[in-house]
């Protein structure tokens, strides 16, 4: 098994959103990657600049990022040529690592745009080192810049940031300050391709929580009627945890609930509903073990939302003559 630590640079429409190609918002212009063996030792590097075909001029943000480097796009190869060589270089037994959640999604977008077959399995699990840095060294929730993590760990800054290869390089140095166990026990799911049916639904168990990714639904209402979506099995033992507070909306397309397992205590359920490219929606549900204090906060939150709703109704009634 090899770790492929990947970083991409991409460009977007220089004339703004209104003029962009709806099929390709972000066009990859550089692939940088580092290969580590099972013990996280560096074995190889991959780096290539890609000649843009959709947005031939650079967006000002892209220019800002890469302005320090003289890039020769005219002599660069096209995305399909570079991508093919890149995947051949990755090999069969690759596990992908990135800083943040965007790179693999954009890579698949670019493959689809060029009508290239995806070499990725389903589901695509990968390792988001930005998340794993937070889980290991900080509060699990915050997402820091790559440079912050490099400073935090006292890694010498020998090369500038914001080139695909240098960012992959720094991400690999951060991985070398983690153990394979810390990395491999904290996978992420890439949501470019989500389950198409019940059989494909994804269930994953982590140390402190469980995750479920659903098949598609027509809308929110349909999703929230589905038993698989709203189930709250205990994340420690898998047995059904009894609902103490039913699912309630907390804004956006998010819902939470409170459940209780006789053996493992309180569980917080969270559902996020997201749109797919075909406008159907799918649900991501997590269930995590929480303290009685956190359980109390959920009760409090529900009560505050109820009072707010009541006040708003009263206010609206008062306004009507
Ligand atoms: Zn339990």
Image: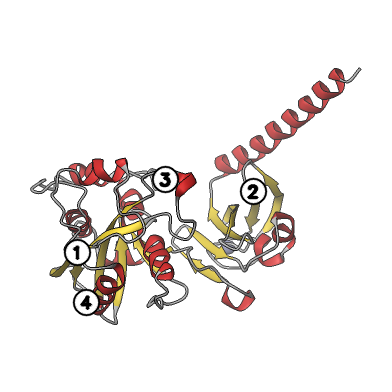
Calculate the distance from the C-alpha at mark 3 to the C-alpha at mark 2.
Answer: 18 Å
Q: In this picture, is 159 found above or below 29?
A: above
**What residue sits right under mark 3 in the picture?**
141
User: Which label was assigned to residue 255?
Assistant: 2
Residue mark closest to the camera, 2 vs 1? 1
Quadrant of the rendering where the C terminus is positioned: top right
User: Which label was assigned to residue 89?
Assistant: 4
Furthest residue in direction left, as rendered:
158
- Coordinates of residue 93 in the picture (x, y in percent): 29, 80
User: Mark 4–mark 1 contact, CB under 8 Å?
Assistant: no
Residue at point 25% right, 64% down? Answer: 5
Q: Secondary structure at mark 2?
A: strand
- Coordinates of residue 219 in the picture (x, y in percent): 70, 57
Q: In this picture, is 285 found above or below 160?
A: below
- Coordinates of residue 238 in the picture (x, y in percent): 58, 68
Residue at point 68% right, 44% down? Answer: 249
Q: Secondary structure at mark 1?
A: loop
**What residue sits right under mark 1 in the picture?**
76
Calculate the distance from the C-alpha at mark 3 to the C-alpha at mark 4.
Answer: 34 Å
Ligand 1 shows up in the quarter that is bottom right
Colour scheme shown: secondary structure
Q: Secondary structure at mark 4?
A: helix
Please tell me which of labels 3 and 2 falls first in the chain. Answer: 3
Calculate the distance from the C-alpha at mark 2 to the C-alpha at mark 4.
Answer: 43 Å
User: Which label was assigned to residue 184?
Assistant: none
Please tell me which of labels 3 and 4 falls first in the chain. Answer: 4
User: Mark 3–mark 4 contact, CB under 8 Å?
Assistant: no
């Amino acid at each position: 098994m090899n770790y492929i630590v990947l970083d991409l640079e991409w460009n977007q429409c220089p004339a703004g959103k209104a003029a962009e190609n709806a099929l390709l918002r972000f066009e990859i212009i550089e692939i940088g990657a580092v290969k580590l063996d099972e013990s996280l030792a560096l074995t190889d590097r991959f780096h290539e600049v890609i000649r843009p075909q959709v947005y031939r001029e650079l967006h000002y943000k892209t220019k800002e990022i890469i302005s320090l480097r003289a890039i020769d796009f005219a002599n660069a190869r096209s995305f399909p040529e570079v991508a093919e060589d890149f995947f051949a270089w990755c090999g069969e037994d690759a596990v992908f690592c990135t800083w943040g959640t965007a790179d693999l999604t954009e890579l698949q977008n670019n493959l689809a745009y060029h009508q290239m077959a995806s070499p990725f399995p389903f589901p695509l699990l990968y390792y988001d080192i930005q998340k794993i840095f937070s889980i290991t060294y900080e509060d699990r929730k915050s997402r820091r810049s790559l440079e912050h993590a490099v400073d935090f760990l006292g890694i010498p800054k020998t090369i500038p940031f914001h080139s695909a290869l240098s960012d992959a390089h720094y991400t690999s140095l951060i991985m070398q300050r983690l153990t394979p166990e810390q990395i491999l026990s904290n996978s992420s799911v890439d949501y470019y391709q989500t389950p198409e049916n019940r059989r494909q639904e994804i269930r994953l168990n982590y140390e402190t929580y469980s995750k479920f990714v659903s098949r598609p639904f027509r809308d929110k209402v349909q999703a929230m009627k589905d038993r698989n979506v709203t189930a709250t099995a205990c994340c420690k033992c898998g047995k059904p945890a009894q609902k103490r507070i039913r699912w309630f909306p907390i804004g956006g397309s998010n819902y939470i609930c409170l459940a209780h397992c006789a053996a493992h205590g309180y569980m917080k359920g969270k559902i996020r509903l997201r749109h797919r490219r075909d406008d159907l929606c799918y649900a991501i549900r997590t269930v995590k073990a929480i303290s009685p204090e956190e359980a109390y906060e959920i009760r409090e939150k529900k009560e505050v939302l109820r009072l707010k709703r009541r006040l708003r109704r009263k206010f609206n009634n008062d306004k009507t003559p």
